[in-house]
Amino acid sequence: MCRAERRHGALLDHTLDVVSLCSAENVFLYVSPSVEDVLGYAPEELVGTTASDLVHPDDAAGYGREVVEGFREVSGPFGPLEARYRHKDGSWRYLETTINVLLDDPEVEGVVCVSRDVTERRRLEEEVRDLSEGLEREVARRTGQHETALDGLAESEERFRATFEQAAVGMAHVGVDGGWLRVNQKLCDIVDYPREELLGLGFQDITHPEDLEKDLGYLRRLLAGEIGTYSTEKRYFRKDGSIVWIDLTVSLVRKDSGEPEYFISVIEDVSKRKLAEEALRMSETRFRTVIEQSPLSTQILSPEGRTLRVNRAWEELWGATLEDIEGYNMLEDRQLVEKGIMPHIRKGFAGESAAIPPIDYDPEQTIPGLSSHEDPKRWVRAFIYPVKDEAGNVREVVLVHEDVTERKRTEETLRESEGRYRAVVEQAGEGIFLFDPRTKRILEANPAFQKMFGYAPEEVERITLYDLVPHDAEGVDRNVALALERGYLLVGDRSYRRKDGSLVDVEVSGGTISYRGKEVICSVVRDVTERKRAEATLRGVREAERNRMARDLHDGALQDLTYALVEAQIIRALSDTPELDKRLADQIEALRRTERRLRGAVYDLRLGEEGGRPLAELLETLVDESRRMFSGCEVRLAVDGGLPDTPPGEGGVEVLRVLGEALSNARRHSGAALVAVTVWAEGADVVAEVSDDGRGFVPGEPGGVGLKSMRERTAALGGDLEVESEPGAGTRVRLRVPMRRLGVAEHD
């Protein structure tokens, strides 16, 4: 829009004609800069005066009445009118003015006048007329003095020819039949015809068909004596077929008898001006199109605050039209004063651009019944800027609105939701905190978190996640990366450090959320100290029960089974009956299998009592026990020296039970000749693998209770269990658990 305004202004700056805008009382409201070249006045010197103040006294009376009456009685173009205007230096200039009355056009509301300086043309016309009349008088007066008359006539003819040929405009004598009688070179240049060829034509031959009837109408009025001269704009065809716009002034020369003799035509090429006018019109059209099709509501105001124009977006925004706000003045809008934005509005009218902050505006409060909307209230923010003329005066003020109602309602809903969320967070029993995943710095924490870890509210934002988990920085980084990748992560049980240095057992989970325009992690920590204590108590009770059961089995059932086995072996040794010997052999083997299984069960039950020994020794014991129970199978053990040499805790015992279950499965189901147990440290994890060369199975088949138990124990340790097998290719069970879950310090 600004570009269109600048182009509009540039066209007015460079046109040779004077363009002015007058009120219904003929008062100048605007005058283009070209007036200084034509009349010597700066535009601002004429604004506020009337055209009558400049018109020659001999022309003023009729000119003033005709113009003012025309303004009141007609709408649209009329003229042209010709009058003498006073130059600033005191001289008089002939101006020909075309008038377009647009008082009813809401976008103009005035009278547009285009005035052309025709002083030179008038001088040439008068000089030609004077010369022509002088020649006639000279011929008539000197009829009896032939020689002298010829000399004077020749001199006068020479002056006329020089004036005719050297004129800066096209000139011609045209017969009453329309044929060219005489043409000057300038006219030939305008229409691009050789003189001889042009003289063989009539003006009708080169006049555009759409302009011919109007031209002939003027000629008929001249011949009838209704008018003495006329001026009009029309189109000629050049020889090459192109069109040239000309300004034509025609007068009629009559014989002494009053009979029409020929026409005198003065032709001025106005193609450049017409191109400029067309460019101006197109620029104005583009400007209006841009405004009309803009998705932003646009309101154009006069310097006094009245609305001159609105676009479709404005009408849709407020449910009103320009006619609905005919009496509205923005500078008197009390609602804008109450909302505190009138200072911003006044900046625009004072010649400054200004951004206007969002307000909740109700058009019904200003003009009751204005809007067709059921709910006319709108949240709008706006931008106001002035449109100035070349002198820097404000001609119009443009106000652009942006409807931000939905955004404001969304923000309000978000604020309410955030308020509810904050109330829930503040009252939650779990510790809830936000932290930056890049710096690990804590951004906010609720009261439960502050109480749980002993930090004052002002201290929370000075700590990082590493202050809470100083013993496992790598684990922190790994879990944060997983949370960012997955969007949510259940970390499980961890030990967090309080401000006083003590540790508290917590269950941790977290997920990503948007916070102040960036992605952060919201983490929830639940104090599980009491749960851990209860679980430890329960485990102690269960372990005591397991130990009691192991003692009962060892001291009771296992001893009885051993005595029965010895007794059966003695009976078999004393028997001399083959049939009885075979039956005893089967029973003895069954008793041995039962004894092995019972000893394995006793070992498994008593694992808790073995906790005072290093993990490597416990693995040796486990494998030795398996070797005793395997028949015809080699069991190998390989332990990496990277394992901790401190006794394992409850987690380590659980790992041994999983490995024991894997060995038991291999013994009972694989038919393997070789079973290998391999245990090693890998980063922060312990990896244990039991593989065999047995018959294998299809992994997709449902597993038994043993495999399910192994998976549950592994998951409880925060680890992974993989089982790989295929028929005829053996089986491999791999267990991976965090080393810290063994109940020993992490080993590098």
Image (tube, rainbow, N blue to C red):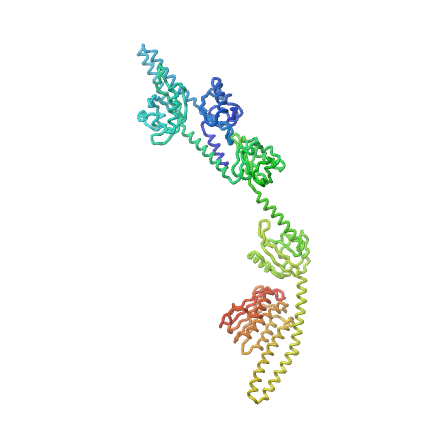
The quadrant holding residue 268 is: top left
Vertical placement of residue 530 versus 240, above or below = below
**In front here: 57 or 75?**
75
How many numbered discs sit on the rendered protein?
0
Residue appearing at x 66%, y 76% in the figure: 552
Residue appearing at x 64%, y 81% in the figure: 560
Residue 130 shown left or right of residue 455 in the figure: left
Vertical placement of residue 2 versus 621, above or below = above
Residue 242 shown left or right of residue 512 in the figure: left
Q: Is residue 86 visible?
A: no
Residue furthest to the top in view is 144
The quadrant holding residue 621 is: bottom right
Residue furthest to the bottom in view is 576
- Residue 549 at x, y = what percent? 65, 74
Residue 274 shown left or right of residue 737 in the figure: left
- Residue 64 at x, y = what percent? 49, 21
The quadrant holding residue 282 is: top left
Vertical placement of residue 744 versus 240, above or below = below
**In front here: 385 or 400?**
400
**In front here: 222 or 623?**
222
Which quadrant is the C terminus positioned in?
Answer: bottom right
Q: Is residue 451 visible?
A: yes
Vertical placement of residue 630 versus 352, above or below = below
- Residue 246 at x, y = what percent? 39, 27
- Residue 411 at x, y = what percent? 60, 46
